[in-house]
Amino acid sequence: MAKSARQAQIEQAALYPLDWVEERSGLVGYTKWMLFRNVPRDVNWMQTLGSATLTAFIVQAVTGVFLAMYYKPDPNSAYQSIQHITNDVTLGWLVRGMHKWGASLFIILMFLHMARTFLFGAYKYPRELNWIIGVLLLVMGMAEGFTGYLLPWDQTAYWATVVGININATAPIAGPFIAQFLQGGAQIGPDTLAKFYSFHMLVIPGGIMALIGLHMYLVVRLGVTSPPWSKVAAGRPRDVAPPDGYGEYREGLIREHEQEGKDS
Amino acid sequence: MSDEPEETPEAPGHSLWPVGFSIGIACILVGLVISWPAVVIGAVLTIVFGVLWIRDTARTHAPVHSAPAHELMGDTPSPGLAAAEEQHLETYGRAGFLTLATIGLGGVIGAAVVLPSLGFAVLPSFTGAGIETNEVDLGPLENFPEGAWVITSFIGNKAQGNVSKRTAYVRNNGLSATKEPSFTIIYSRCVHLGCPVAPNGPKFEEQAVTYKDVTLTPVQPAGFGCPCHGGAYDTEGNRTAGPPVRSLDRYAFSIVDGNLVLGKHFSVGTVEGTGAEARIQRYPVAYPGVHVDGISKWLYPLPVPGA
Amino acid sequence: MASKLKKENQAEFKRYKEDVAKEGKPFFPYAIFHDTVMSLVVVVVIIALAVIWKYTADGTEAGILGPLYTEEADPGTTNFIPRPDWFFYFLFYLLRIFKWPETVVLGTVGVPTLLLVLLLTLPFYDRRPERAVLRRPVAFVAAILVVISMGVLTWKGATAKEGSEAVGEVPAWAEEQGFADDPVAVEGATLFAESGCLNCHVYLNAGGQNLGAPDLTEEGLKGRGIEWQVAHLKNPSSKVPGSQMPSFATLGDENLTKIATFLEASKGPQG
């Protein structure tokens, strides 16, 4: 369809800002490449677990930022601030609830994602580094859970943390030093809560975000695998002919036939 | 002009200056932890050897062919300058010196920022005094009838407030064979992993007494049990069942003006005998789960400062 | 050998890239649509859980999803039962399995560290390019075993019972076991609940199972008699050889008789 001059004009105006940014940074081109790059045509629903985990993390980060505006990290006022958030602050109960249950979902999704990756053999060449980063993310996620658990400063929080720190103390040679560092002294004291808060808000999330960035960069660069049982897996040996009807694929809710590759 | 082998025209000769420099740096770091004079000595060593080292590497033993450089610059050196340059040795060259200097200075900046911050993050945990429970006044001796157990909850450190609240199981043993007052004061946290240990017996809440911010509740325990992983102790704090790795911790005490005053917290290997005649194997305070005697104590050979 | 493997791997990756370039479909909108749907499900589930939590609980009163918070931290408490977050239950239960003092360090750091190292180095000891599940029997079986054992440990950690403050349960016990009309037995039941017996014994679905202690719900049916019970409480290993139960002699004869009466009256749920 030939474009009318008017249409061309509108298109120009709309694209002008994008071109401006692209010329000065190259970002638009990169984003386009990331969005419109090819992925294997047989990707499976199980492969949405990774982005689901990312969503859960984003929920945690956003709700965490807003909770931090009301939470007071001092043993004498932490519990009251949590009660205040839950009972008094408008929608405080919702943000706190989302943060608490988002944490559980985050951990569950990480385990499911890890299981899916294991099942698909997607930790093998060339994705070994990504697997290692993933395991580190799992450990950091659980550390987030551990440090965050102390923050409400109620009985559950306090005693679970006592036991958790003492578990570290049982490690040979270095154990007692690790425990003393975590506690900020010989016993859980006023510094412990501030230290856990700093770890929970700054240190570990910083590490998680850096590793997620690296993790996603590798996914985009190396590509996602096809399910191992797929007859048309990307990377399959060349001597195996594709099955009849190859080229037919379901796109979301839309079925389409493609004529290419259909013989007979 | 000596003709050094061409294959290593840029390598500096062997020298002891780097060794001296490193010793200086080490002195500074150790001194930061231990003593100021060491820091000063270290700084002097570092500067002196650093200067000597840099001077040495900027000097060279092989001749420089400066002709190509001058060609590039499009000038011709005067004969005098040429001779001086030949004399004057730039094997290391400007590029090399600048590289070294950048890395060196970068290292210094990095160290200057990171080391104090790391020290700040880590060292205070080991130089503080923990929760001082010395000199906590638990109240008059009348509140501790002879032979009876009392659950005593107190604030260990007034400045820290409620976070330093602790509990001890106190029994007045009367007088020992040498006519000295004897108390068994057992810390209420399990030595497996720190859970709160409960008395195995009826508590008499209605007879509870308060003395300032100390709460005293009579109890009649047959022993002590931990709800977390099944640890059990007898009334001397010795382990009778479960995973605890030693006996329950205790406190020392003193009697001041007829009041029971809490002393230092210490860990216990085992207790032989009971009550006033008990023989207690004392150790410095150890973390729960840490063996203080037997073979397994060698898993934890290093004492933790500030514990 | 290694370089043959490497060549295989590289060739496969090359084929992969060719296939994706030729037959692949664009990430946007085909794949990202699925991602978006799944993300929506995640967000909806989180919000739903938050709403249910708020509207079924009330402060420290638990609803379906637990209380909104427990009591404020009391570092001097003597009757609280610590529990970690649910995703640590498998480690928590592991600690109950390693209950001999010399093995504590295995349960706390030994086993978990070993498993973590195995997990981290997986790509280095499983180098075969094979991806089909049924052609990786070791991996498949190992994965199933890990999932099952973590699931079992987590579930057992979640249902691990405690010697909790069951004093409030005594009237209900009296009703169910049918000794409500016997005041001595009721007093004995209260003493039983206060003396930490439930740390090791189970009674009518309360209490913990530790160190091989038997379930006492139907102790009265064993025909042991009050004298036996009192003697056992004073010196357990004299009546049950090899018993790890400590002595309760310091409770005094009167209290021991009450507990014995209660035990002998415990004949299992009455109708």
Image: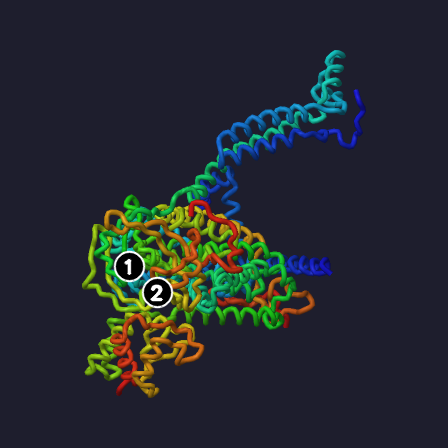
Residue B235's disc is: 2
Between A264 and A95, the one nearer to me in the picture: A95
The residue under label 1 is: B174
Does B218 sit left or right of B129 as displayed?
Answer: left
Q: Position of residue A59 (x, y in %)?
A: 38, 54
Marks 1 and 2 sit apart, C-alpha to C-alpha, by: 16 Å
Disc 2 is attached to a residue of which chain?
Answer: B
Q: Residue at x 35, y 66 (%)?
A: B225
Mark 1 vs 2, N-terminal side: 1
Q: Residue at x 69, y 67 (%)?
A: A239
Between B81 and A197, the one nearer to me in the picture: A197
Between A161 and B86, the one nearer to me in the picture: A161
Q: Quadrant of residue A52?
A: bottom left
Q: Position of residue A54 (x, y in %)?
A: 45, 55
Check disc 1: other Cα within 10 Å, few if <14, some if 14-19, many if 20+.
some
Disc 1 is attached to a residue of which chain?
Answer: B
Q: Which amino acid, by three-letter code, is at mark 2?
A: Thr
Q: Where does the N terminus of chain B fall, quadrant-wise? A: top right
| Residue B27, visible in the rendered structure | yes
Q: Position of residue B55 (x, y in %)?
A: 65, 23
Q: Which amino acid, by three-letter code, is at mark 1?
A: Gly
| Residue A48, visible in the rendered structure | no
Local secondary structure at mark 2: loop
> Badges 1 and 2: C-beta atoms under 8 Å apart?
no
Does B13 sit left or right of C131 as displayed?
Answer: right
Point out the residue furthest to the front here. B178
